[in-house]
Amino acid sequence: MMETASSYPVNLKLSGRKCAVIGGGPVALRRTRSLAAAGAQVLVIAPKVVDEIRKMADQGQITWLAETFSAPKIVGMFLVVCATDYENVNRSAAWAAKATGALVNMAAPPTELSDFTVPARVEHGDLRLTVSTNGSCPELSRVLGRELADEVAAVYGPWLDRLQPLRQEAKRSLSDSDVRLVFWRSVLDEKVMGLVRAGKYDEAEAIVRDAIGRFRSESQNGAR
């Protein structure tokens, strides 16, 4: 029995990239919203679309081409999502996209033609948590995503907000990247993370800030 190759996890930066969504139903809407939120230039190709896609097009957030799919319409695309109710159309669009070098996501059958799957995700500011079953059970991914939202993002999202200015402060105070690596590995210990899990962000922040000062003093003394 041949083993399925593992997928390579990645976060794509799509700002300004040309992306096409083939189809105009609820699944196409979800992909369209996500691509537009990522800053992509989204072209939806479908004779008919749900009201929200139509509204997004009217507001200039995306472009809607009210026609059936044909290969020339996706030339120059970086990414193509195939999400129609017709497997033959999805298949044709997938192979046409692959021929141009575009990445393909099959949001509808035949899903085996996908170059990548879209994980369930939870976001809190800059904290992004994703869950994937490699396409084998997206329903489980969504359930686990809800659990992550309740148990992880709600706790660590606010802590990330606190860490961002502290990270800049550490970068200014500790010029050596190796020193900063040792610093962060040591300072985010069980004591600090225990305070974070308890919602005691002020106390955790104070410990990190104090540690920055101590590491700065120790690194300066060591350089003498």
Image (tube, helix red, strand yellow):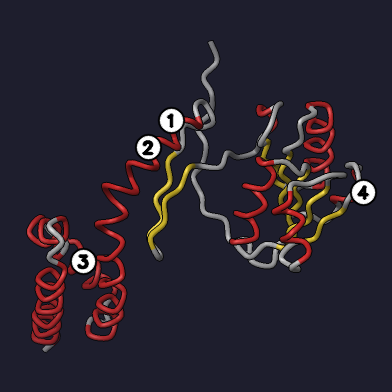
Measured Cα–Cα span from mark 2 to mark 1: 6 Å
Residue of label 4: 72
Question: Which residue lies at the image location 80% right of the left edge and 60% below the top edge?
Answer: 63
From the image, state whether disc 3 or disc 1 is nearer to you.
1
Residue of label 3: 184
Give the mark, 4 or 1, whose residue is nearer the N terminus: 4
Instruction: Give the vertical position of 100 relative to 85 (above or below).
Output: below
Q: Which mark is residue 140?
A: 1
From the image, state whether disc 4 or disc 3 is nearer to you.
4
| Circle 1: element type | helix
Residue of label 2: 144
Where's residue 91, x and y in %?
80, 30
Instruction: Give the vertical position of 83 relative to 177 (above or below).
Output: above
Does the residue at mark 2 contact the one at mark 1 (Cβ under 8 Å)? yes
| Circle 4: element type | helix
Measured Cα–Cα span from mark 2 to mark 3: 29 Å
Three-letter residue code for mark 1: Leu
